[in-house]
Amino acid sequence: MFHPALFKGMTVVVTGAGRGIGLEVARQFLDCGARVLVHAGRSIGELPDFLESAATEGRAHVVTADFLAPDGVESLAEVVRSRFESVDILINNAGTMVGRFPAAELTDEQYQTVVQLNQTAVVEMTRAMLPLLRKGTHPAIVNTVSISAVTGGSAGSSIYSATKAFVATYSKALARELAPEGIRVNCVSPGTITTDFHQRYSSPEKLEATRKTIPLGRLGTAEDCAPAYLFLASHVLSGYITGQVLEVNGGQLIA
Ligand SMILES: NC(=O)c1ccc[n+]([C@@H]2O[C@H](COP(=O)([O-])OP(=O)(O)OC[C@H]3O[C@@H](n4cnc5c(N)ncnc54)[C@H](OP(=O)(O)O)[C@@H]3O)[C@@H](O)[C@H]2O)c1
C-alpha cells in the first residue's frame, strides 16, 4: 500500500474503471488521496461501497460513455472538462478483446470494433485530455497494453493483440514528443489477469494450462496490477521513467 497522501489534491481520470483492473486502480488512487473521475464503461451497475462513499464526498465522479458510439470519447472528455480545470494523471485502460475472430472469417465490422475500442479511443482520449494535462502538476499518462502486444496472443486475438502493440508504440513516441513539456507517458502490460475479461474469452482449461506456464505459479489479479499504475503515475516514485512498458505477469514473459 502506498502512502495515503501520495496523490493528495491530484486529479486523475481512469477509463474502463467500472470493474476489473480499472476499478482497482481507481480504488487505490482514491485511497491515496486523489480526486478521481471514474469512467465506469458503458453503464453504471451497483457501485462498490468505497466508490459510493467517495462519490458522496465529492472525491469520485462516476460517469459512463460508450467508446464505440459516435462521439463516445468526446462525450467523456466533455464531462472531464466540466469537472476538472486540469488533469494530473490520465489512465487509458478501457478495452477488451470483443471476441475471438479467426483471421479468414474476420468481418469488417469486427475489425473496426476492436480497433476503435482498443486503439482509436486511446488516441482520441489522449488528444482530448492534452490541454488539461498541460495545466496539470507533473502530468503523467499510463496506458494499459497487454502481454499479447509482445507475444501476439492466442488464436483469434490477432487484431486485439496488434492494437495493444499500437498503443505501446504510440506511447513510446508520445513519451519523446511530450517530454519537453514534462509530461511522462508509460504503459502497464498485464499478463493473464482473473477479471471478467478471461471469463468471457478463455475456458477454465485454457486458463489452467496458462497458469502452469507462469513461473510464479498463479494467474494475476487486479490487485497485482494496480500498484504498477500508481508507481508510473507518481512523479515522486517514477519521475525519471518515461516511454516504458512495465510487464505485470508473474514471469509469464521474461525477455
Ligand atoms: N484481464 C487480462 O488478463 C488482461 C490482460 C492484458 C490486458 N488487459 C487489458 O486491461 C484492460 C482492463 O481489462 P480487464 O481485465 O479489467 O477487463 P474488464 O473487467 O472486462 O473491464 C474492461 C473495462 O473496459 C470497459 N469497456 C469495454 N467496452 C467498452 C466500450 N465500448 N466503451 C467504453 N468502455 C468499455 C468496460 O466497461 P463495460 O462494463 O461497459 O464493458 C470495463 O470497464 C483492458 O484494456 C484489457 O484489454 C487485460
Image: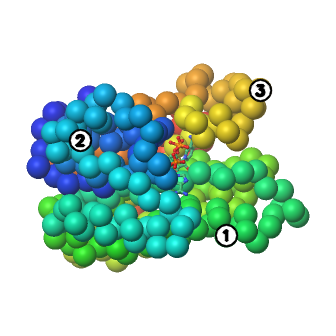
Residue behind mark 2: 55
Q: Is residue 188 visible?
A: no
Q: How crowded is mark 2: few (under 14 residues within 10 Å), some or many (20 or more)?
A: some
In front of the other: 246 or 62: 62
Q: Which amino acid does label 1 sit on?
A: Gln
Q: Residues within 10 Å of mark 1 (few under 14, many from 20)?
A: few
Q: Which amino acid does label 3 sit on?
A: Glu
Q: Give the answer, above or below, for where 206 lies relative to 139.
A: above
| Whole-percent x, y for residue 140 in the image | 28, 60
**Of the image marks 3 and 1, the number of the one nearer the N terminus:** 1
| Whole-percent x, y for residue 173 in the image | 43, 73
Residue behind mark 1: 112
- 135 horizontally vs 145: left or right: left
Q: Distance between the residues labelled 2 and 3?
A: 39 Å
In front of the other: 128 or 89: 128
- For the point 40% across and 40% down, the residue is 23
Q: Which amino acid does label 2 sit on?
A: Ala
